Amino acid sequence: MDTVHDCSIYTLERGTAPLLISIPHRGTRIPEALVDEMTPVALRVDDCDWHLERLYAFARELGASILLPEYARYVIDLNRPPDDANLYPGRDTTGLCPVDTFDKEPLYRPGHAPSREQIEARRALYWQPYHDALASELAALREAHGRVLLWEAHSIRSVVPRFFEGRLPDFNFGTADGASAAPALAERLAEVVSRDGRYTCVANGRFKGGYITRRYGEPARGIHAVQLELTQVTYMQETSPYAYDDTRASAVQPLLRELMTAALEHVAAR
């Protein structure tokens, strides 16, 4: 695998397989210019998809390309549409430039929430380059292989009352209700988890896929997108300091490998 772009905005490692793993919420950096405007809570970047680049390290052996951002979702959320439309109408959610945490703690000091002009500037500076890289790599992989699988890797605390009641299933597969990938892909992946028997799962439940899954998944053109929202309890400590748990991670990684292999086979057969 070669690093084809390593900059202050994102890192793209290019692989050899028709597989691109996007991890849009892994960034942790806050620009120096924003530090004085944001609260101490914001600087903890609690709502990060912690350690996913480490959890998915095995995917390099599968030939995957991997795209990682540098900046935190508190700066701008790469998995939200540029017009900030709510992807889950009627449900509470955080926006393109969030103003509070998942626990509704303010991210900005009074009077310092980003203006429309500031949001647009961030979109151009941080959001657009990531999406340009994503689109370009998908196009290159499709050209080389005919079909490509976009795996949107996410993780979240297993209990977040703001977004869902009770405890979230461990594996949450989303294909925009089947629109972003080959028919029954999410259901096939859920079957793999159910057969394993150690974790709970759901297909197109609370999390059906964010903007990236919905925007780039075009199965008719050979681009198949699936989002996996994985509960963090399956591989790490869910509270600060958010430590990686080698025992839990090493237990779940073989299943993640099996899921990616099954997804690639499913896409190749279409």
Image: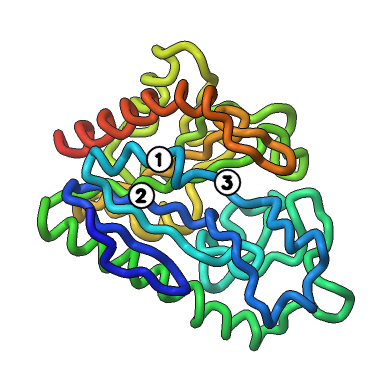
User: How crowded is the residue under tag 3: few (<14 C-alpha within 10 Å), some, or many (20+)?
Assistant: many
Residue 50's label in the rendered image is 3
Quadrant hosting residue 143: bottom left
How far from the left and from the top, in percent, is residue 211? 48, 58
Q: Nearer the viewer, mark 2 or mark 1?
A: 1
Give the left or right position of residue 191, taking residue 92 as reference: left
Quadrant hosting residue 138: bottom left
Query: Mark 2 or mark 1: which comes first in sequence?
Result: 2
Query: What amino acid does circle 2 point to?
Result: Ile
How far from the left and from the top, in percent, is residue 41? 80, 59
Q: Which residue is mark 1?
A: 56
Q: Which residue is mark 2?
A: 21
Query: What amino acid does circle 3 point to?
Result: Trp
Question: Helix, strand or loop at disc 1?
Answer: loop
Query: What amino acid does circle 1 point to?
Result: Tyr
Of residues 34 and 163, the one drawn nearer to the viewer in this rendering = 34
Quadrant hosting residue 261: top left
Give the answer, above or below, for where 8 lies relative to 247: below
How far from the left and from the top, in percent, is residue 155? 55, 41
Query: Mark 3 or mark 1: which comes first in sequence?
Result: 3
Residue visible at 57% across and 56% down? 87
Give the answer, above or below, for where 200 lies relative to 108: above
Give the left or right position of residue 183, taking residue 105 as reference: left
